[in-house]
Image (cartoon, coloured by chain):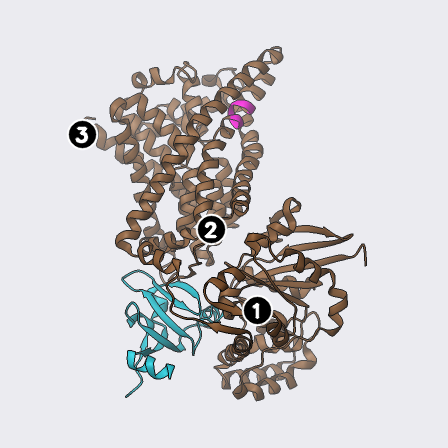
Amino acid sequence: MAGKEFLVALAGQPNVGKSTIFNILTGLSQHVGNWPGKTVEKKEGFYVADGSRIKIVDLPGSYSLTAYSEEEKISRDFIINERPDAIVLIANASALERSLYLLAELLLLKVPVIVALNMMDVAEQQGVRIDVGLLEKYLGVPVIPMVASKNKGIRALVSAILSLPRWQKEYVPSLADISDDHKDMFTELSDILEEHISPPYLARWTITKIMEGDPDITNKISQTIPPDSWSRVQAILREHEDSLLAVVRGRYDWIEGAVKTAISEFRKGQVFFTDRLDDILTRPIFGLPILLGVLAFIFLLTYGLGLPLQQVFESMMNSLASRVEPLLSQSTLLRGIIVDGLIGGAGTVMTFIPVLFFFFTAMAFLEDVGYMARAAFIMDRFMHVIGLHGKSFLPFCLGFGCNVPAVMGARILESGKTRFLTIFLTPFVPCTAKLAVVTLVAAAVFGKQAFLISWALVTGNILILGFSGIIVKKLFFKKDRTPFIMELPFYHKPNPRTIGIVVWKRITVFVKKAGTVIVIFSVLLWLLSHMPGGEIDESILGFIGQSIEPLGRPIGLDWKMIVALLSSVIAKENSIAALGVLYGVGEEGIRGILPNVMSHASALSFLVILMQFIPCVATLVVMKQEMGNWRWFLSSFLFMLFLSYLSGFAVYQFALMAGI
Amino acid sequence: MVDDIVPLILLKEGEEGIIHSVSGGRGFISRLASMGLTFRMRVKVLRNIGGPLIITSNGTRVAIGRGQSQKIFVKRLTAARKKAELT
């Protein structure tokens, strides 16, 4: 049997430990990309054993296989079109009913299924005992008990996959039936439809889907069968409007049978750890202060540990630059591109890695132990007001670190419109780089009041995020109510491996963007600011700045500040470097010179605009990619330009009047 | 006694009910069913003080918006009926 190739799909509802199992099986062979043409992550990897190679495709998490969410459609299309050798369904032993629902759907697709019954330890703790042998017999599919968090059962799962050719011949799974009162309807439909259903679609599955009212399949079938047959089908469907319930009922009858057969002991009503903790954490009076406390702690930790390291990285970059510089002394162009563009631009961005590392680790920890779902729950009532979902809270939190993973994090939102709105608003979450600029400028210009100013700017941005949400919702999504259904997983011990992989992924996304997009744009910016004159005031950028200076007057910005703002689009902290160059003092002298060249009113206006200005190119690129739509992207772009100008104007005029 | 069928949102914290019916689109009904929330299932309300509700059913806990919980109708289980169910 050596040398065989297997294609295995990993399926499972959220919170069953699917990614843990995927990570154990595939380790470093993982490849993460996107499903073709979709903004849904595709993860695949290999497991090699006994000379056989198992290719594992992680199907996007889904509760069922309906056509109502993109993830679920991708999963089922993959199974139907690619026909993997086997599907491993990860089930949660402590909530077996629910996991079996997805199994009932999968079995209809006629690909051999192996049930990996995970979290056996949790079930045991809760007094749920499962007789694996009886369950296997009832379902007619192999069942492997597992505790993936402790690495138990992996070997058994692998050998079940490898011995597939042996058991496949005798594989006869039990299938869920339609409930009795609708069996006739099923027969009537299959009499009409059977001859028109051709591979890769299977008759029983297709008819069940039509009874469920699946829009996708219904549409497909309506186009392939003769019109008179189709009108007969429609008549039957009209007659039985409750056919979806008949399908669901049939599945739950089947599930009940399994539970009755295999679960031998069931104690109810015990107070679990989760109950106790939730009693406190989900009560708004305690939950909200605790949430704010947790976040405050994370920020303190992140900056306390990250900032010193960032300074170390910075000095490393500087010494690298000073070492490279002499080697390139012959050519100013080359020196500019490499030292100022590459090292100065992309290098500075890289110095943010320590801060991001601590921040993302803390976030991943909270996600892994199950706290983030509670945070989303607590925040839902506030998010609702601005047309969002409690779940939007997670991407926003990530945004304080870096907007790039935050925009990508919006993928956890199922509804397209909520996802769009979350992405639209994410740039208003001030990232570490923005905060760095604000802190520096505020400290230079306002001295002792700097902290107050920075605090007011951050608060202001969050308020603006809220108001923008309300406005956009009022204008575009009037009728749209955002349904909120979210599972609250049980609290559990953190798994370092899972956390590590999440952090690694988020950081690499950031590094890749910095390494490609930002390098290109940093070099481009250097060229724009040094060509043709050699100095920035005789350059294209300087020319642009000078020619739009009249626009800056009402908002209190001279052309140098405008250019600094424009260069912040490469990466926020570039604006500091630009100011240094423009005022001819270099980055070090900036603290000394700023109070002389920026009035308080101008500085305020500059900071307010910077906070709301279009984000850096890396974020822009990801926004476009995740929105997948030029119209939305451009409207968000223009919105930020307009809003920042307006707020700058308001703040500047107010400051002048108030005599600040 | 007449069956006391009410939308889920009217259950107080700690009260239980048996799902009687769900109104709304097929997408909504399918989603609930796949999370174990379908008719004949027993649910308990853990949290219901403004904002979304937290309910639990068969070892799964789910946060669900107020709008959605108006569309799920349950037969309220009173203390007396709970006892009757057990015997």
The answer to which image quadrant residue B67 occupies is: bottom left
- In the displayed structure image, the side of residue A15 where residue A155 appears, left or right: right
Q: Which of the two labelled residues, at mark 3 and mark 2, occupies the earlier sequence position?
A: 2
Which circle marks residue A658 in the picture? 3
Estimate the x, y position of residue A42 in percent, counting from the top left.
60, 52
Could you tell me what secondary structure mostly forms the magenta stretch?
A: helix
Secondary element at image label 1: helix
Q: In the figure, A552 relative to A13: above or below?
A: above
Q: In the figure, B82 relative to A127: above or below?
A: below
Q: Nearer the viewer, residue A125 or A422?
A: A125
Residue located at (38% from left, 41% from top): A429
Asked if labels 1 and 2 touch by Cβ distance under 8 angstroms, the answer is: no
Estimate the x, y position of residue A620 in percent, counting from the top left.
49, 40
Dot 2 alpha-carbon crowd within 10 angstroms: few under 14, some 14 to 19, many 20 or more: few
Was residue A97 drawn as part of the magenta stretch in this picture? no
- Disc 2: host chain: A
Residue located at (35% from left, 77% from top): B74
Quarter placement of the C terminus of chain A: top left
Number of marks in the image?
3
Q: Amino acid at mark 1?
A: Asp
Quarter placement of the N terminus of chain A: bottom right
- Disc 3: host chain: A
Residue highlighted by disc 2: A493
Residue located at (42% from left, 45% from top): A636
Secondary element at image label 2: loop
Q: Which lettered chain is shown in cyan?
A: B
Are the numbered discs 2 and 1 placed on the same chain, yes or no? yes
Q: CA distance from mark 1 to mark 3?
A: 61 Å
